Image: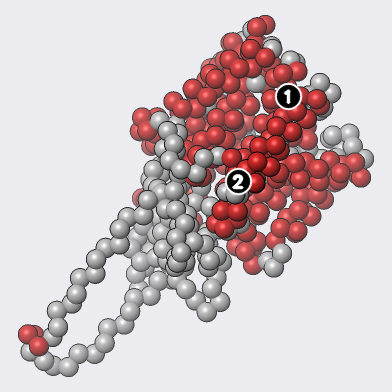
Amino acid sequence: MSDTRFSPPVTTPRSPEEDGGPANTEDGGPANTGARWPLPEETFWSESTDPHGVSPGELTEPQKAVKDEPPQAQPEPQQQAEPPKRKRDPYLDNVKFVLIALVVVGHSLVPTLSADSSRALYIFIYTFHMPLFVLISGYLSRNFWNSNAKTNKLVDTFLVPYVIVEVGYAALRFGLGQKWSLTIIDPAWLNWYLLALLFWRLSTPVWKRMKHPVPVAVAIYLFAGFSQIEGDFSMDRFFGLMPFFVIGLVMQPEHFEMLNRRWIKIVSAVTILCAAAVAIVIAPRSPLGPFYFKSSFQDLDLSWWMGLGVRTGLLVCALAMCFAVLALVPRGETWFSDLGTRTLYCYLLHGIPVLIAKDQGWLELPWLHGPLGVLAISFSCFALAIVLCLPETRTVFKWVLEPRLTWLYRRPSRS
């Protein structure tokens, strides 16, 4: 993920060209969102402008005809001062680091889910952490539109790392004594997010054309429960988490500003505490299937009306917790703001130590099955998330996870 920073809210709207979108046209186009925040230009979360000179759709100003005059009679062109470099606002970076730390904790708790304390924390985390990740991904995809640079970046950022990670984890499992298994169309474990995000982003222009995209996405999400959708190409989670991506697409900077009010922060804190209490109460008898946002009603052993009720309730609870977390996360610069710019590395690499720990039985020690064990796992995973988000980690693995495949593409014509 890139280290580029984005600015706090400003009062004048940015042009589509500044946000990496096409030039302004009569109908505005999908990139004309009216956003007042410049979006962070990151390879995993957002799009940047065309690296090959003129942005897609950009027109150069025609030159005026000049009469035959001596050179000294022509006025010298005035040099335009370069605009100051915009500073990146740390708010979403803070959110992303908190979420990626919870991802590592959630994956590490799996061997200890027989303990009620571990199961309660697991349910609490899985109710909102991936929905909020998807919501942020949708918000940062608002200006995605078909262009040479954006199409190239889809390959560089999603497809190539996806294949590399799939092969890498297959080799790791084989090295740990498991049977060799490599199925590119069926993502292994955490790799599902790359494919799902790829298809969500490709669908962005369609959602931007709709008058009421959120109700449509919610309807698709609810009725997807009637079908047993396979996990090939992450289609089960593509439909299961679709509303969160679309909600992120329609959100504007002022919606985030609304969450910065004191009374909303108080309500958010109460919401988080109530959610934690509910997780503790339901942990001993609640199934985990619904919290993965992918299973059909038949897989969950639910009637159609119970299935619709469970999906609706889970959607409401997840959104409430998402907005509560967004309201409570610090908005200013923190010690972990810079770490939040490299969450891709933590997401794709943390599976290596977690898989090794599971295979070796380190996470199944008896003393880990209890409140103290949950705290020990949580603090260890938090430290692991910090290490994997360090700039040194990016330096070592950038050639794998952020390849620059400029040799693969044709340069766009400047005419």
The spot of residue 381 in percent (x, y) is 54, 22
Quadrant for the C terminus in the image:
bottom left
The residue closer to the viewer here, 48 or 117, is 117
Residue 298 occupies quadrant: top right
Residue found at x 60% / y 49%: 261
Q: Amino acid at mark 1?
A: Ala
Using the rendered view, name the quadrant where residue 236 is placed: top right
Give the camera-side residue of 276 and 365.
Answer: 276
Q: How many marks?
A: 2
Q: Could you classify mark 2 by the number of other residues whose Cα lies within 10 Å: few (under 14), some (14-19), or many (20 or more)?
A: few
Q: Residues within 10 Å of mark 1 (few under 14, many from 20)?
A: many
Q: What amino acid type is highlighted by mark number 2?
A: Arg
Relative to 38, 362 lies left or right: right
Relative to residue 159, is residue 107 depicted above or below?
above
Distance of label 2 from label 1 (alpha carbons): 29 Å
- The disc, 2 or 1, on the residue closer to the chain's N-terminal end is 1
Q: Secondary structure at mark 1?
A: helix
Quadrant in the picture for the N terminus:
top left
In the depicted view, which residue is nearer to us: 154 or 131?
131
Q: Locate residue 102 relative to residue 227 in the image: left or right.
A: left
Q: Residue 110 placed where, x, y %?
A: 67, 21
The reply to whether residue 16 is in sight is no
Q: Which mark is residue 262?
A: 2
Report the residue marked by disc 1: 120
